[in-house]
Image (cartoon, rainbow, N blue to C red):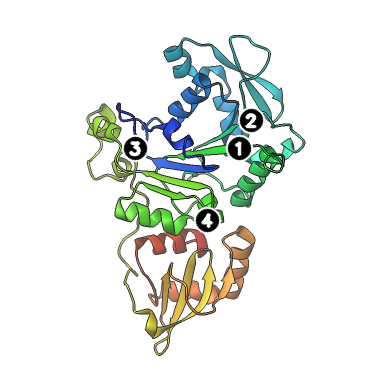
Amino acid sequence: MGLYLPNGYVDIRGILAQGLPFNFLVGGRGTGKTYGALKVVVEDHIKFMLTRRTQAQIDIVTKNEFSPFKPINRDLGVDITAAKITKYNTGFYADDSGDPIGYASALSTMSNLRGFDASDVQLWIFDEFIPERHERPIKNEGAAFLNAYETMNRNRELQGYKPIQTLCLANANDLGNPIFMELGLVSRAMRMQQTGKNMSLLRDRGIGLYILNDSGISAQKANTALYKATAKDSRFNEMALNNAFREDDAAHIQSKPLREYISIVKVGEVCIYSHKSDGTLYATFHTSGSPDTYTGDDIDIKRFRLKYGWILRKYLIGELYCEDYFVKEYLTTKIIAL
């Protein structure tokens, strides 16, 4: 399948047509992710849930002055407005009709919607699911995402209905984000970014992963005012136009032969090995042997840090090497949290 429409924007219908329940689209700003998703739900009459990470973000986008539906209203000649249903749930309404065409709720407060009947929701649009560096994390954010899906999906598959499809949308920022960590997608996404691969369909898991590296829109945006004003190789341009994710310097980056090491602990997707003779450590996404194992959730990471705090000391004195930039990013931002 092609990822883009002839105008260069992402093909949301084509992605949904793959029939996968979980779809993650990560790409530079202005590639039509949010607009395309909202345009499809309006044109195809798909009942939806729109989610942002926090209640404050939802409160903003459900104000009609800041609504993401403003360009949809303009381009399609419709009048979609928002109105509160409950404290934690807002409805979107078209042309003063009584029945909402969709809903909006925050991930951080969605646990308050247990008992909410979402049986008519067909598509969950989670916009900006990757937090920016300055944003506070949500406690157990990856698990909160899965619990929210369960709240809406419930037993519909057991009753013979299709599961809710999700569109999780974000700009390039941090592949080691809580949801990717929860689903074990970090290393795959990082390899895709490294190799320029833009699509990975994990049909056995119902997951579609899309890294929008090559949108024609990026080339067009490079000639607009903001991107002309910033340096071509600035971090902002690399992230916004070229979908570049955070990388650090080359310190501690070195590929090592695993035969010289013994695995000691795996946390999330990273396995840490100890050298058989000199005691230096090596971190990689490859796992062998029988290491002590911790998941990537918040509680297990805290347990890991309590037991293996000495690994941080090894890193700080230059005795821990990472296979590549992506392992280092994962390890330092999510596991030992420098």
Of 116 and 160, the residue lying toward us: 160
Mark sitting earlier along the chain (4/3):
3
Label 4: which secondary element: helix
C-alpha separation, residue under disc 2 versus residue under disc 3: 27 Å
**Residue at which label 3 appears:** 2
**Residue at which label 2 appears:** 121
Residue 154, image x and y in percent? 71, 41
Q: Callout 3: 10 Å neighbours few (<14), some, many (20+)? A: few
**Residue at which label 4 appears:** 181
Q: Is residue 246 left or right of residue 115?
A: left
The answer to whether one can see residue 196 in this image is yes
Q: Amino acid at mark 3?
A: Gly
Mark sitting earlier along the chain (2/3):
3
Contact (CB < 8 A) between labels 2 and 1? Answer: yes
Of 221 and 45, the residue lying toward us: 45
Contact (CB < 8 A) between labels 2 and 4? Answer: no
The tag on residue 164 is 1
C-alpha separation, residue under disc 4 versus residue under disc 1: 21 Å
Q: Amino acid at mark 1?
A: Ile
Indicate whether 123 appears above or below 82: below
The answer to whether one can see residue 133 in this image is no
Mark sitting earlier along the chain (2/4):
2
